[in-house]
């Protein structure tokens, strides 16, 4: 059952809205009068209009109250204004030759449209695509673009799951950006929020039982995925996923915080979503991906249905990030309390999850499941992302928390990992501007509640109480990237290093292999040593997270040549350039240093 305004080739438009409690619903077409809608047995109201102009504004009058369309495709005047009819068939796509990009091949660049450029628009993002492509990124992940209040927001306060943010450039702007990516050979992933509605403008909650009091969430009542009337709520979100794939040619969806999707049904929503997206992939002839963010360390998310799983394609690995971050920064407050040893990062490399039904001192219980048997392509790892930067009180990036050599080490640890790497915008040239939390609400009580919530959130971290004002435009402005920094010596060196790391990941067959069977992980001399093989290709990555030099020994009988050193003078470090062969079985690696060796093939 399609919801919203579906524009057809003959210029007619079908309207559908779910409102099971209403006794009367009429379609209010601005400047064109009203039409009584007809209710079906499941509580959907329908109306069809012939020869309607695209761009017509409308609302629904529900038992005397005028409300926007909860499945609005565009809100030209913001969350409180009318909805608008969009003719998606009118866009002239240029990506007919695009066949997609395999998930395991992706190097993902996460960006926030509003702070990625000074302009904060889709068009401005498009203007930077060549630089991202030349750096080696073949996929961008957009933080949520569903319509939110005002003009500045992370996107997780979206009130209209189908409507593209008006201040970013609306539907046309997003399509043009995606088209431009595909023409260049870049995939586009979109962050979507199916676990809550934003606190301002979410009139959808007035339309029907989209929420249930069965569960408590950080945002209040939970979205209704398993209570009475949940079939129609599930339909709303499944149709939303298919909408992004069909009308916007999106290559995959990142599902925000699926641990906050409460669903105890025998056939969970996530499984149903994966089945429907799988069907669409087969029908369209191109694989589309579902990637979960989850706090549960539950490997069932990425296992197929026949193995008792949900059938999602990948999930973010917080354990990898937390292990890396705590080890480099020494932070142990909050959720970093359960991490910080080299054994943690070694397990993250070897298995994926660190907490695999072992005791968590922070959660004070056993936690997680083993991911040792799952291929690396099921996990996405990072040294930074919007949450781990922006949910710090001051929004500090890793480059502001550790020294230069440690920051370069973190980059190599991620890009050369046996998982899918994700880089947060600006990280690839060492951006040191913060990424702060910002909003643009219109209700004073809500604004104060957000401020109070941020202060309470940081109480357990010991960071003080000088919290930047989320509502302030200055907070938003401080979070913008400064692209001119890329030409300064230190930032240029970082940018060049990232480009080299990505190139090595693609060139060396052993690094492209995300099958853990071809990998050995060990701790030697206080450093992490990761050996990987594929056919005749071999690679040995040494990561020294200590300040002191690590002394190591290799006894595998192979000939190794150094192809990368994060401490090289080339990257403004104190070490040697690449090209040297290991002389004998003993060797050393500088402190806070990543060194990659490639196996030298002798006599073919």
Image: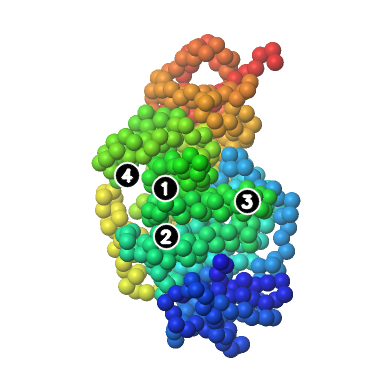
- Name the residue beneath numbered marker 3: 281
Q: Check if mark 3's residue and mark 1's residue have beta carbons within 8 Å.
A: no
Residue 226: give x, y in percent of width and height.
40, 59
Q: Residue at x 42, y 60 (%)?
A: 225
Viewer-proximal residue among 229 and 578: 229
What is the distance, in whole Å, between disc 4 and disc 2 at their CAs? 29 Å
Secondary structure of the residue carrying numbered label 3: helix
N-term mark: 3 or 4: 3
Mark 1 or mark 4, which is nearer to you?
1
What is the distance, in whole Å, between disc 3 and disc 4 at their CAs? 37 Å
Q: Residue furthest front?
A: 41
Q: Check if mark 3's residue and mark 2's residue have beta carbons within 8 Å.
A: no
What is the distance, in whole Å, between disc 1 and disc 4 at their CAs? 14 Å
N-term mark: 3 or 2: 2
N-term mark: 1 or 4: 1
N-term mark: 1 or 2: 2
Based on the displayed image, in which of its 4 quarters is residue 600 positioned? top right
N-term mark: 3 or 1: 3
Question: Looking at the image, what colour scheme do you see?
Answer: rainbow
Residue 42: give x, y in percent of width and height.
48, 71
- Name the residue beneath numbered marker 1: 294
Question: Can you say which quadrant of the picture contains the C terminus?
Answer: top right
- Name the residue beneath numbered marker 4: 335
Q: Check if mark 1's residue and mark 4's residue have beta carbons within 8 Å.
A: no
Secondary structure of the residue carrying numbered label 1: loop
């Amino acid at each position: 059952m399609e919801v919203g305004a579906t524009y057809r080739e003959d210029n007619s438009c079908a309207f559908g809205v779910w409102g099971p409690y209403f006794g009367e619903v009429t379609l209010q077409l601005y400047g064109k009068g009203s039409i009584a809608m007809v209710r079906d047995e499941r509580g959907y109201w329908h109306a069809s209009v012939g020869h309607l102009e695209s761009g017509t504004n409308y609302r629904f009058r529900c038992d005397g109250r005028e409300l926007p369309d909860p499945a609005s495709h565009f809100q030209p005047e913001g969350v409180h204004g009318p909805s608008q009819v969009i003719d998606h068939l009118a866009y002239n796509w240029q990506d007919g030759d695009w066949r997609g990009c395999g998930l395991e091949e992706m190097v993902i660049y996460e960006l926030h449209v509003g702070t990625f450029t000074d302009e904060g628009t889709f068009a401005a993002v498009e203007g930077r695509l060549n630089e991202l492509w030349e750096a080696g990124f073949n996929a961008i992940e957009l933080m949520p673009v569903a319509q939110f209040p005002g003009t500045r927001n992370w996107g997780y306060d979206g009130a209209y799951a189908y409507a593209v943010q008006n201040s970013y450039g609306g539907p046309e702007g997003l399509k043009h950006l995606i088209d431009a990516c595909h023409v260049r050979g870049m995939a586009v992933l979109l962050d979507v929020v199916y676990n809550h509605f934003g606190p301002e403008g979410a009139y959808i909650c007035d339309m029907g039982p989209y929420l249930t009091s069965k569960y408590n969430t950080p945002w209040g009542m939970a979205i209704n995925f398993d209570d009475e009337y949940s079939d129609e709520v599930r339909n709303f979100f499944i149709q939303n996923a298919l909408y992004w794939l069909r009308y916007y040619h999106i290559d995959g969806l990142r599902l925000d915080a699926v641990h906050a999707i409460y669903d105890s049904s025998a056939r969970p929503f996530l499984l149903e979503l994966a089945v429907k997206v799988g069907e669409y992939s087969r029908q369209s002839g191109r694989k589309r991906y579902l990637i979960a963010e989850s706090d549960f360390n539950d490997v069932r998310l990425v296992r197929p249905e026949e193995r008792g799983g949900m059938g999602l394609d990948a999930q973010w690995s917080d354990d990898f990030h937390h292990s890396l971050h705590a080890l480099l920064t020494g932070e142990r407050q909050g959720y970093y309390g359960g991490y910080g040893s080299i054994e943690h990062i070694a397990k993250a490399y070897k298995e994926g999850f660190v907490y695999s039904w072992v005791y968590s001192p922070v959660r004070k219980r056993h936690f997680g499941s083993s991911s040792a048997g799952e291929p690396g392509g099921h996990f996405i790892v990072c040294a930074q992302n919007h949450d781990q930067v922006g949910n710090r009180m001051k929004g500090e990036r890793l480059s502001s928390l550790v020294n230069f050599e440690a920051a370069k080490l973190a980059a190599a640890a991620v890009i050369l990992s046996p998982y899918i790497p994700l880089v947060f915008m600006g990280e690839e040239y060492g951006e040191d501007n913060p990424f702060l939390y910002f909003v643009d609400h219109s209700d004073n009580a809500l604004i104060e509640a957000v401020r109070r919530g941020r202060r309470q959130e940081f109480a357990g971290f010991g960071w003080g109480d000088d919290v930047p004002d989320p509502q302030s435009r200055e907070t938003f402005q401080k979070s913008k990237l400064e692209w001119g920094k890329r030409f300064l010596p230190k930032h240029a060196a970082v940018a060049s290093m990232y480009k080299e790391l990505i190139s090595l990941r693609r060139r060396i067959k052993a690094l492209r292999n995300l099958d853990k069977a071809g990998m050995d992980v060990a701790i030697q001399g206080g450093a992490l040593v990761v050996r990987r093989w594929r056919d005749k290709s071999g690679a040995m990555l040494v990561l020294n997270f200590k300040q002191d030099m690590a002394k190591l020994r290799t006894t595998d009988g192979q000939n190794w040549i150094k192809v990368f050193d994060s401490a090289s003078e080339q990257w403004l470090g104190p070490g040697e350039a690449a090209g040297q062969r290991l002389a004998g079985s003993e060797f050393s690696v500088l402190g806070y240093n990543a060194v990659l060796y490639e196996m030298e093939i002798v006599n073919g």
